[in-house]
Amino acid sequence: MTTADVTIYGAGIFGLSCAWAIQRRGARVQVIDPDGVGAGSSGGIVGALAPHTPENWNQKKQFQLDSLLMAEAFWSEIDAASELSAGYGRLGRVQPVLDVRGLDLARDRIAGAAQFWRGQAEWAIVAAADLDGWHPASPTGLFIQDTLSARLHPRQACHAIAAAITAGGGAIRAEGRPDGLQLWATGAAGLQDLSAALGQMVGNSVKGQAALLDLDRRSGPQLFADGVHIVPHADGTTAIGSTSERAATDPVGTDHQLDELIARARALCPALEDAPVIARWAGLRPRARSRAPMLGHWPGRAGHFIANGGFKIGFGMAPKVAEVMADLILDGIDRIPEPFQVAANLKSQTTSA
Ligand SMILES: Cc1cc2nc3c(=O)[nH]c(=O)nc-3n(C[C@H](O)[C@H](O)[C@H](O)COP(=O)(O)OP(=O)(O)OC[C@H]3O[C@@H](n4cnc5c(N)ncnc54)[C@H](O)[C@@H]3O)c2cc1C
């Protein structure tokens, strides 16, 4: 007798979200991860769910918009089913307007948001007086505020979704016999495995380091300035992220690059100055060759599927990734945008005469 209709390898945000969506449609799931829930890139602390800019619209931006708009219902169901909290909150994001060019761009994006976000969220220009003392430094005294950005706590979100799956009858195991269809959501290691199996590089990993501070701004927006994310969490901590490092000798260690990031964040946002650092963390972001998520059938392996390539926005993309993967795996309906297909990450195959 089989114990699962679908076996999911990898208990990161992609594997867990897909398992949840598949289980919600009535299939039996087991998630197998020898290192446990949130052991990879998803066990982190930043959790900015922030949109691409509303301009030069394309399929990737539309998919991300759909996913960000699905997130509130997605995470509230998980909180209810798990009796835990993912720490989700749609509290927006504030960024400084640096100069006149930035102001012109912000005005264009207000129009872009009206056109592409269609009243579901706004892009606005605001002054410091509107921000209740919680904002980064701004040379113009002006800020961009969007109402689409949200936050969650990545590690807590992974444990909440795992508990929701278990509460619904699914299994999370360190090892087990494969049963049914198989979904590989194995992050950075999975990109390596896939590259080896296909005989070509389909992706790699990019290390990131982040810190958690003891600073309670839980009802404030996330801040973004000079490439630094400052993300207040619901539990009264505030995260700072992240470095971006291509060739990492120590994939999960933190070093002086994180110290520099913390110093930069404190210079950008004086409210962080005296807040003690309570945790340091590093992980490997799975980056597909196309830099977009890589979703679909495993080429040449019937009954095997891939959900990988979350790179820097895996948590923001997860609700929609889970939906399209459940459509594909359970119903055979392929709603994956062309740039996210596995084939988009493969070198074009040429046949010699
Ligand atoms: C510093 C940092 C900051 C980030 N900040 C954000 C952010 O603010 N917002 C955002 O949306 N994203 C952010 N990300 C990116 C996000 O964390 C990733 O996109 C996401 O975690 C990828 O999820 P995943 O499930 O694909 O991979 P992972 O979380 O890496 O999960 C893969 C899992 O597969 C398991 N595994 C590997 N091989 C096997 C096997 N053979 N069998 C079974 N299991 C296996 C591993 O143990 C692991 O648990 C950040 C990442 C980093 C590193």
Image: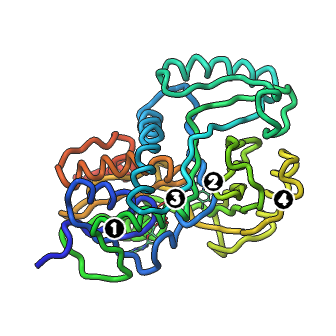
Q: Position of residue 39 (x, y in %)?
A: 51, 73
Disc 2 beta carbon < 8 A from ligand 1? no
Contact, mark 3 vs mark 2 (Cβ under 8 Å): yes
Q: Does residue 76 appear in this view?
A: yes
- Residue beneath disc 3: 85
The residue that disc 1 covers is 167
Residue 313, given in percent of the width and then of the height, sits at: 53, 49
Q: Nearer the viewer, mark 2 or mark 4?
A: 2
Residue at image coords 51%, 62%: 204
Cβ–Cβ under 8 Å for marks 2 and 1: no
Q: Secondary structure at mark 2?
A: loop
Q: Which residue is mark 2?
A: 234
Chain-order first, disc 3 or disc 4: 3
Q: Give the secondary structure at mark 3.
A: loop
Which label's residue is closer to the chain start, 2 or 4? 2
Distance between the Cα atoms at labels 3 and 2? Answer: 9 Å
Q: Are marks 1 and 4 in contact (CB under 8 Å)?
A: no
Q: Which amino acid type corresponds to the residue marked 1 in the rendered image?
A: Ala
Q: Residues within 10 Å of mark 4 (few under 14, many from 20)?
A: some
Is residue 197 among what the camera can see? no
Q: Residues within 10 Å of mark 2 (few under 14, many from 20)?
A: many
Q: Are marks 3 and 1 in contact (CB under 8 Å)?
A: no
Query: Disc 3 versus disc 1: distance between alpha carbons?
Result: 15 Å
In the rendered structure, which amino acid carries the disc numbered 4? Answer: Ala
Residue drawn at x 72%, y 18% as measured from the top left: 104
- The residue tagged 4 is 275
Amino acid, disc 3: Ser
Counting residues from the start of the chain, the first of labels 3 and 1 encountered is 3
Q: In the rendered view, would you say 229 is above or below 252? A: above
